Image (cartoon, rainbow, N blue to C red):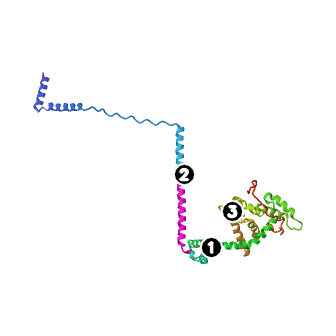
Amino acid sequence: MTGKKTYKLKRRSSKKAGGIYDDTFSLNQEKIDNALRKKYVPPPKSRPPPPAPPKLSKTLKNDELAKCETELNKERNRRIELQNKISELEMILSSLQEKLKLVSSEKGTNDRSLDDIENELRIATQKCYAGEECSEDYLERLDNALRSHPEYAIREQKIRSKWDYEQKEENEKALKIMKKIVPPNIRSTTEEKIEEDIREKVSDEMSITSGDIKRLAKRIFRNKALHIVHYPKNMISKLYVNDLVNKFDIGTSLDLTELRAVYASLPTQFDNDNDGQKAEWKERIRSQLVNLVRNNESNNIIPNKKRNSVYKNVPLHGFFQIEKEENWSPDAADPYA
């Protein structure tokens, strides 16, 4: 009974306080009803995790790695090639710019005479030799102006033709001498056979010794350029460039008579020489011969260069008869065809 009474007292007291309890209850009930009227939206479902990548076998991994390395190397090579091309183009550009400067600075140079340019170049060169201050660019400009002068090529050709005409007799004389010393069958013989053939030609009146013959045969056989004295000119004109430059390289060992003979054996022009390498090879022989002739005329030549000591006891008439130049024509079986 006591408890029931207490309950009623609490309820009445709440009403006396302004009905707070009942109002609060009604408000909360209204919020609940409103919430229930709203459309129920279920919470978003969590997305499943992405599937794991397929596991590759060890072989497949190595193959993929090798492919990647190959592609990387290709890209690296491409980059290097591009860098090289860029460097090459920069060098070409720099060279063209320098030439352009020379051309622009030499405008009006050809208005001067060839003698004026030569005189100026001679004075500038003497100053350099004397230790005075000189400019390499200035000397180079003068040299270019000299070589590009219209009269220079004409004068040089005249000098060249005059020299060839003046030396032709001596060159032909040297060729006859060497043809009598070098055996005519030089294209198909051996060093031992050369020595044997020379011994057969030696008479008691000759002062040549066995050692001299051996040394002579060795020089003749091993200096391939000497073999040219018995080659028909039309055959020489058809020789491959590699044979001329390598097999018949004159080097620096030939003496004046040998060099004259080789030069006299050469044709005026070469066949199949579009790039001019054959003509350039002949020009090197000529240049060396011009120097030896100049040194000989000024008595400034080494004795062994004037005539090698191996010919000291060789008779003037040599050992072999001079044969007419072989009437050679290309044949399919001929290595020089």
Residue underneath mark 2: 77
Percent coordinates x, y for residue 138 in the rendering: 56, 73
- Calculate the distance from the C-alpha at mark 1 to the C-alpha at mark 3: 24 Å
Residue name at image x 80 percent, y 65 percent: 179
Count the labels in the image. Answer: 3
The amino acid type found where label 1 is placed reads Tyr
Look at the image and tell me in which quarter the C terminus lies. Answer: bottom right
Q: Is 91 included in the stretch rendered in magenta?
A: yes
Q: Between residues 26 and 117, which one lies in front from this camera angle?
A: 117
- Calculate the distance from the C-alpha at mark 2 to the C-alpha at mark 1: 48 Å
**Label 2 with label 3: CB-CB less than 8 Å:** no
Res. 302 in view: no
Residue name at image x 56 percent, y 74 percent: 109
Percent coordinates x, y for residue 94 in the rendering: 53, 64
The amino acid type found where label 2 is placed reads Asn
Q: Earlier in the sequence, mark 1 or mark 3?
A: 1
Q: Between residues 122 and 310, which one lies in front from this camera angle?
A: 122
Percent coordinates x, y for residue 82 in the rendering: 53, 55
Q: Secondary structure at mark 1?
A: helix
- State the image quarter where residue 46 is shown: top left
Residue underneath mark 1: 152
Q: Between residues 143 and 173, which one lies in front from this camera angle?
A: 173
Please name the predominant secondary structure of the magenta segment in the image.
helix
- State the image quarter where residue 20 is shown: top left
Give the residues drawn in magenta, as a range: 81-109
Q: Nearer the viewer, mark 2 or mark 1?
A: 1
- State the image quarter where residue 122 is shown: bottom right
Q: Earlier in the sequence, mark 2 or mark 3?
A: 2
Q: Is 39 included in the stretch rendered in magenta?
A: no
Residue 278: image tag: 3
The amino acid type found where label 3 is placed reads Lys
Look at the image and tell me in which quarter the N terminus lies. Answer: top left
